[in-house]
Every structure is written in structure tokens, then in C-alpha cells.
Amino acid sequence: MFRGYYETAKLELPDDMELREFAIQPFSSESYVRHLSFTSEQELRSFLIEKAPLQVYFSAGKYQSPSAPDMESKGWMGSDLMFDLDADEFCELNVRRFCMGTGEEVLGDECVSNVVSYSEVTAECLKQVYDKATLLKDVLKDDFGLEGEIVFSGNRGFHVNVNCYGDCALLDREDRKKIVEYLTDPRVEPGSPSDFGWAGRLARGVRPLKLDEQVTIDIHRLRRIPGSINGKSGLPVFRISSASELDDLLSRSPFKGSRVVIQPLVTGELNVYNVRVTLKKDLKVTINSEVGIYLALKGLVRLTAYVK
């Protein structure tokens, strides 16, 4: 299915893709294949059709030799700025734990075999995180003069990316750390609601952000390609400009419009982006492809047949 998708997928690639390192994660592998380089969209597309990877990325960094086998020999030329906002930092997620031996939901240490965890994410939760991403974008613009873009990761979070040139691109790890500290712990007292920066925001009741510092300070970080598939959900990565785009995420699945037969590995009633699904271990059922693929990628079901 992934191979067929990449035959026609509209991938949003950087204008300087020849300077970027690309990377993929193959199916059935926890590791990445890195140090790849492509000079055109067609060259990349041919590669994706051949390999049909689970995940595909390009680097925030720009390099003289992006395919060099180690970072020291790539010839770093600068990096974009990246910020990561994940649902579990802003919402109380309902985390379900299933024992893969029995398929039953478990609490504590009841299971003697492998346990699979599943976090139920709702549209309401994602909208809360999107509001924080919008705040981050506004602060970057107002306080630093930087233009950020918000990208839905395709799973349960957002990235705010700044395509950097000049001085912005050459910020080192310490510079980027200071930006994160300003956003998460501004160390100013509330002033007047009309004051500039965090003094005014705090007076208006706006709270500092929660960000993953490591994402931002890592100049060699990988970015998801808008238009690619998130291998944890089967949903596309896409730029977002309105919270309403989160109302029916499953409708964005490139696999919708067909059905699949699944063999559940667990028993329970689950929430999949506000869609309720009832599963009973080993009892095969036919469901919509977008839901079946999502659950399969979460390790909760096995796909057994594709129904056109």
C-alpha cells in the first residue's frame, strides 16, 4: 500500500534538496537508513517506490556532501530551526495497556508476556496542542522576526519549522538552547497586558510553552516530509493553518475508500481519533482500511486481507 501511495504522492520538498541528507525507516526495523542524497523529486520518488519505507525524512541541516557517511565529513552549512509539540505534554491521554499473551487490558505488572501500550488521542486534544503551536509561531514572529510553519506530524503532535538562511541557519546548539529557554522559561515578571514579549503575555494569562529541547538544539535533526506517510498511523504529514483541519483526520488517509480484514491481537473498545472500534482477540472482522491500517501500525491488529 505504501508503495502505491508514493507513485503519485505530492511531496513538499525543500528547494535546496540536493544539500539535504535523506533517511528512511524500513518496515520491520527499528533503525534508520541515513546518509542518502537525491538531486530531484523524481529520483527520490523512484527510490521510495522501490523501497516502500515505513518512514521518510530529510535533514534540518544543509551540507556540502549530504551523503557522506558521518556528520563530520558532510560539511555543515547551516540548519533550519525546529520545534516539537507532542500531545502527551499538553493533554491527559488515556493510555491503554494490553497483554499480548491474552489480548486483555492490564493494570500494573499483571502481564508476564509483552505489553503493548496504546494512547488514545482525540481531536479535542490535538486542537489544544495546535493552539500552542499557533502561539509558538506568533512568538517567533513577534519576538524574533522569524516565519514559522506548522506541520501536523501525522500522528499526535505538531512541528513548527523555520526555514533558515543567513544568521538564523548558523545558530549553534547554545544559541538554539537559549531560544528554547526563552520560550519555556522566560524569567520575567508579568507587566502590563500591553507590554511587549512575555511580560505582556504573562499579564494576559498566557503561559510559557512546553517543548522538547533536544529537537531544537540538534542541528542534524531529521524533518518529516509534508505529503509523506507517518508510519505510526498511516496518515499523511501535512501543513496546517486551521484547527478545523483536525476534525476528521481519518478522512485524510490515502487508504480510505476500501476495506480490510483484520485479526485483532487484543480485546477491548478503542478510540481512534473519535471513532470507536470494538475488538475481540482473534475474531476477524472487516473494517475501513484507514482504521485497520492505523490499528495495525499500532501493533493492535494483524492485516489479513485487502477488500477492494
Image: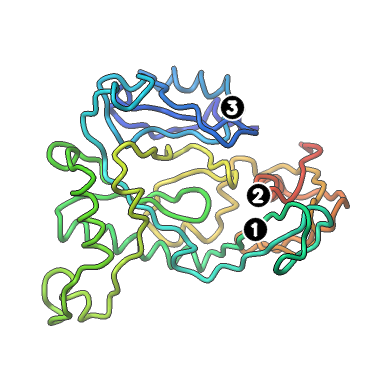
Q: Nearer the viewer, mark 2 or mark 3?
A: 2
Tell me the amino acid under the disc marked 2.
Lys
Whether the residues at callouts 2 and 3 have beta carbons within 8 Å, the answer is: no
Identity of the residue drawn at 61% across and 28% down? 4
Q: State how far apart marks 1 and 3 are (Cα).
A: 25 Å
Residue 95 picture quarter:
bottom right
Q: Is residue 101 above or below residue 81?
A: below
Residue 77 picture quarter:
top left
Q: Position of residue 14 (x, y in %)?
A: 32, 32
Identity of the residue drawn at 75% across and 44% down? 259
Tell me the amino acid under the disc marked 1.
Tyr
Q: Which residue is mark 2?
A: 298
Q: Position of residue 296 (x, y in %)?
A: 70, 45
Q: Which residue is mark 3?
A: 52
Q: State how far apart marks 2 and 1 are (Cα).
A: 7 Å
Say few, some or many: other residues with alpha carbon within 10 Å of mark 3 (under 14 / 14 to 19 / 20 or more).
many
Q: Position of residue 252 (x, y in %)?
A: 55, 48
Q: Which residue is mark 1?
A: 118
Question: As drawn, is 161 to the left or to the right of 52?
Answer: left
Q: Compare marks 1 and 3 and give the one earlier in the sequence.
A: 3
Q: As rendered, which of 151 and 169 lies closer to the eye?
A: 169
Whether the residues at callouts 2 and 1 have beta carbons within 8 Å, the answer is: yes
Q: Compare marks 2 and 1 and give the one earlier in the sequence.
A: 1
Question: As drawn, is 111 to the left or to the right of 148?
Answer: right
Identity of the residue drawn at 39% across and 35% down? 12
Question: As drawn, is 8 to the left or to the right of 304?
Answer: left
Q: Position of residue 93 (x, y in %)?
A: 56, 67
Q: Compare marks 2 and 3 and give the one earlier in the sequence.
A: 3
State the residue lying farthest toward the right.
283
Q: Secondary structure at mark 2?
A: loop
Q: Secondary structure at mark 1?
A: strand
